[in-house]
Amino acid sequence: MIQVISLLLENKPGALMRVTGLLSQRGYNIESLSVGRTLDPQISRMTIVVDVDSLQRAQVIKQMNKLINVLQATDLTESPAVIRELVLLRIRTTQENRTAVLKEAEIFGGRVVDSSTEGYAIEVTGDPEKLGEFVDVMSAYGEVDVIRSGSVAIALESKKLKLQPPIPTKTLVG
Amino acid sequence: MSQLMSGARMLAECLAREGVECIFGYPGGVTLPFYDVLYEHHVRHVLVRHEENAAFAAEGYARTTGKVGVCCATSGPGATNLTTGLVDAMMDSIPIVALTGQVSSKLIGSDAFQEADTFGITRSCTKHNFLVKRFDEIPQAIHEAFYIAASGRPGPVLVDITKDALQGQGHYQPVSTIHLPGYKVFTEGHTGQIRRAAQMIAESERPLVYSGGGIVLAGAAPELREFVQLTSIPTVSTLMGLGALPTEHPNFISMPGMHGSYAANLALTNADLLIAVGVRFDDRVTGRLAAFAPHAKVIHVDIDPAEVGKNRVPDVPIVGDVKRVLAKLNKLIDETPAPEQKIAAARRAWANQIAEWKAEHPYDRSTSDSEIKPQHLMSEIDRCSGGQAIVTSDVGQHQMWAAQLIRFNEPRLWVNSGGLGSMGFGLPSAIGAQFARPDKLVFAICGDGGFQMSIPELATIASHALPIKMVIMNNGYLGMVRQWQTLFYNHRLSAVELDCFPDTDKLAAAYGIKGRTVEKPWELGPALEEAIKEPGPFLLNVKVTPLENVYPMVPAGSAINEMVLGPPQPVEAA
Ligand SMILES: Cc1ncc(C[n+]2csc(CCOP(=O)(O)OP(=O)(O)O)c2C)c(N)n1
Ligand SMILES: [Mg+2]
């Protein structure tokens, strides 16, 4: 099944490698992964979508939480959250189809970001599943090239971030 | 007050502050600044002969003391040579800190001489790792490394330090706090869950303690003993947990699993409650997971939340330090009235049943008049040890026989590579153990295969006159692989014969240490006694029956009660 995970991660060298390494090491298939800074430049937020056996869902979260640089791992699969993705799509289309393409783009809330005699470049954001439909529809009008950003998600209920306090180092031995 | 010093000197100061007595290592180009400091520093450096063995020695030190073991290697090949030891420590949750040199920070990424991406390579081999590029980051990284290695579920931590960081000069200010905001250590265990566990224990008719390496790591052997004392519950211990409850304890059954005892495997299969403490339901213990302990409810106590529910979903999960959880549980049980009549009677029947299983199929201890059987060798080592010696082991048949037949009456005596099963572990880990415990009799039991992976360390042993008693169980084969080929690959013995085994008496002499070879049963006892009497190292080569198999054996994919108990009986011709 598809699992959506939101991670808060210390912005340290190698932190991203630890997360992706863990996913491949444990045999979890990554559907998408996106990462960016939060308001605090020391902390990044990641959204990871994995395809796992439903019994493994808790295990994925626990393994993530074990990474020293992970501050919080949350399973958003079933909790209230907004999940969005961005698609940039370039379409080559015939003169006759141009209007139809624009109409369809509008239905999906798309925005034309470039137009030429060859066709258009269109930007759409939305629910990842809906974007799949958008791409399918567009493909019917001509040759398309697509880049998807991967899902980004935010929980609708805020979960308190519990950070561990500093630890005094041992007193001098010997 | 701060002092002007080099990064390398800061490193040594931080190690001293962490109470490090000795480092097992091997120098090289980029670690020169550190070795220059060690030249006159009180932290002792032990030169091993291969970096893999530095990591194994650090493990031997950690496994026998519970303190963090330290190893050190240069960049590139030095660091890559460490990796087997790191994974080994990872699999068995052993606290070690590995220090590696790295090329200067400005050369990173240029394929400089002896550059390897140690930080990337060891990501999955460690609990955590650091890449330090500035001298002033060294103290923080070192103290964090030690804290992470030793706390929670222990494990290996690597600190990769660039040459320019070691050379950089600055004011050293001892670090007073470390901050790891995302590192959660679970200690206490949920009180409500512990109460539920106590209740479940009180109601169980066929309870069984399934105890493991976590008990040893947590120093929870006293609490385990108290628990068993209070409840009289029979106990099995995994390979990693041997000694936590003395082998001779009346409630101790034995090791379960692939080569575990008949009674231990049947007890697991018939129990109605497992009190699983510091274990991870490893496949070598459970056999076919779906058929493992099919009638049992499970209380699972572990410090690592990811282990709880990973392989078996427990009825009562308790995430916490097994030492503290057991202490609380003991207190609760102590306050609870003794189990009611019906339960008490069922428990007596259960204990009798287990005693019967034990008597029905004890481990094979057979001897022969003409040759030394492997079981005979282990019984003799057991006799000499009396449950008190440190015994390290390689991986293979000898390891299983040693685990079956040698008594361990304390934790931290049995040192072996359980999770990774690394051949060549026995000898170098004995080096670490003997440095850690100079007072102890240390046996290193090696396979004739594994020994040949460790021969270079004879120099380390000779150089420090370490009184390790090395015993080679010489069966002429990669015995455990040969056993599988015999049993499951139609006797097609492929690449398992160890021809050209060296004359170990000459080998010992070449290193200036004592050695002897025996092959007759009557020579064995006296040879072991000679080895023990010798104040220095001793290399004893014991030629044993070549084609003996380890039993019981649970074939891969079978349930653990589906044991093969011995060789097929010869069938009379019709
Ligand atoms: C480094 C390594 N390589 C290969 C193996 C696979 N293996 C497991 S047991 C074994 C045989 C070990 O032979 P020996 O050391 O002679 O011990 P014996 O089984 O004969 O007692 C082998 C090759 C291993 N465990 N470790
Ligand atoms: Mg052998």
Image (cartoon, coloured by chain):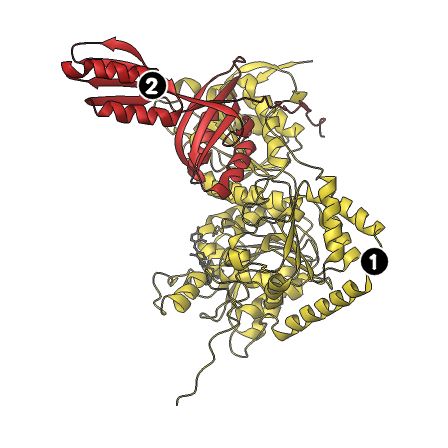
For residue A87, side relative to residue B507 (left or right): left
In the image as oriented, which residue stretches furthest toward the bottom? B574
For residue A88, side relative to residue B304 (left or right): left
Q: Which amino acid type corresponds to the residue marked 1 in the rendered image?
A: Ala
**Are discs 1 and 2 both within one chain?**
no
Name the subunit of mark 1. B
- Disc on res. A136: none
Q: Is residue B516 visible?
A: yes
- Judging by the rendered image, the residue that carries numbered circle 1 is B338
For residue B341, side relative to residue A7 (left or right): right
Task: Examine the rendered structure and indicate whether residue B350 appears above or below residue B98.
Answer: below
Q: Which chain is yellow?
A: B
- Judging by the rendered image, the residue that carries numbered circle 2 is A108
Q: Quadrant of residue B403?
A: bottom right
Residue at 76 percent across and 53 percent down: it is: B227
Residue B556 x/y as whole percent: 46, 60
Give ligand 1's quarter of the image.
Answer: bottom left
Mark 1 vs 2: CB contact within 8 A: no
Secondary structure found at label 2: loop
Q: Which amino acid type corresponds to the residue marked 2 in the rendered image?
A: Phe
Q: Is residue B9 visible?
A: no
Q: Nearer the viewer, mark 1 or mark 2?
A: 2
Residue B28 x/y as whole percent: 45, 31
Secondary structure found at label 1: loop
Q: Quadrant of residue B573?
A: bottom left
Q: Quadrant of the N terminus of chain B?
A: top right
Chain A takes which shade in the image? red
Q: Quadrant of the C terminus of chain B?
A: bottom left
Under 8 Å from ligand 1: the CB of mark 1? no
Q: Residue B475 versus residue B560: which sits nearer the camera?
A: B560
